[in-house]
Image: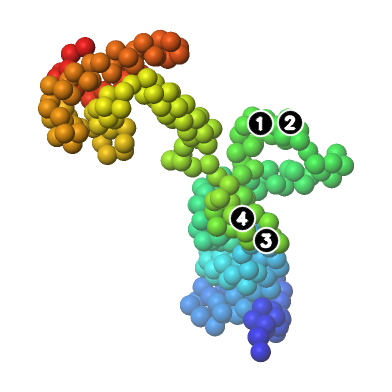
Amino acid sequence: MTIDLLGCYLREIDRYPLLSAQQERHLFACLAQGDGAARTHLIEANLRLVASIAKHYQGPDGFGTPLLDLIQYGNIGLVRAVDKYNPTFGVRFGTYATYYIKAAIWRALDEHGRLIRRSSYQIEQYRHLHALTDDLTHKLGRMPTISDLALHTGQSERFLLQAQTVDQLPLSLDAPLSPVSDEATLHETLASQQSPDPAEVLGEQERVQDMREAVTMLLSALTQREREVITCLFGLDGNGEREALAAGSELGMCRSRVYQLFHSAMRKLRRAAATHGFTSQLFESRAPSAHRKEMPL
């Protein structure tokens, strides 16, 4: 069974009657004498005023805050108003307390109602802009443009655009993009700064494939032993580059024979590269530095 806490609270405060101006003056006179019961009576008699004001902050203005929470924030302002009010101010207590109630609600919303805190100046600018938007909508018969608002406020359009973002709620990266499906989230649609551009990845894959085809074509101009030497020295078999001594040991030949086959293969590769229009540096640019020192071309 669900208990309607809001309904119970509203029925409870309806039990406290409103005060006349004479009763207010009498209670505040008693409060000045230190009468705690008079203070409690003043607070209870104005709880309905707080509930009435809090209802105006439901929805976007209250950033989705429950009404019962808004009322509790307003009650804090009411208590502060009771302690600050003086009958010599010349206004009824309800008029005076309204300011403190609204201020307490806005202060609480600013501190607890959002993930990103805004300054009181920004909040006040948004409230003024929101009220002006409603007024111009009634006068113009349409929603005012940012130019209309700039004309009536004297502020720049850039400033007004920033002021309009105060009421925007933060979005969760894990929230579904569609209310009817949770398959895709906002996080999945955002570009990653660490992930490479798909077009660049595809282009690189194509360049690597072209390089492999070119190497295969050029190696076909060599003898089997020359291909074996080039494959070992450049690591074309995927086992990494080997030095001449290691390549000779693997292929069953001395280092001098490796040098001889290397130079012979490089001459054939240059001629084949020129014939097919490839750069003559195709293999030199990939040769290990140790090979270049050991095998001057």
Q: Position of residue 132 (x, y in %)?
A: 73, 43
Query: In the displayed structure, does residue 268 sit left or right of residue 202?
Result: left
In this view of the protein, which residue sits in the foreground, 222 or 22? 222
Q: For mark 3, what is the residue?
A: 181
| Type of the residue with mark 1 | Glu
**Callout 1: helix, strand or loop?**
helix
Q: For mark 4, what is the residue?
A: 184
Quarter holding residue 230? top left
Please tell me which of labels 4 and 2 falls first in the chain: 2
| Type of the residue with mark 2 | Ser
251 to 48, vertically: above or below: above
In this view of the protein, which residue sits in the foreground, 142 or 271? 271
- Rate crowding at label 4 as few (under 14), some (14 to 19) or many (20 or more) other CA atoms within 10 Å: few
Q: Are marks 4 and 3 in contact (CB under 8 Å)?
A: yes
Q: For mark 2, what is the residue?
A: 147
Q: Nearer the viewer, mark 1 or mark 4?
A: 4
Q: Are marks 1 and 4 in contact (CB under 8 Å)?
A: no
In this view of the protein, which residue sits in the foreground, 33 or 107? 107
Quarter holding residue 267? top left
Tell me the number on the disc at residue 157. 1
| Type of the residue with mark 3 | Ser
| Type of the residue with mark 4 | Ala
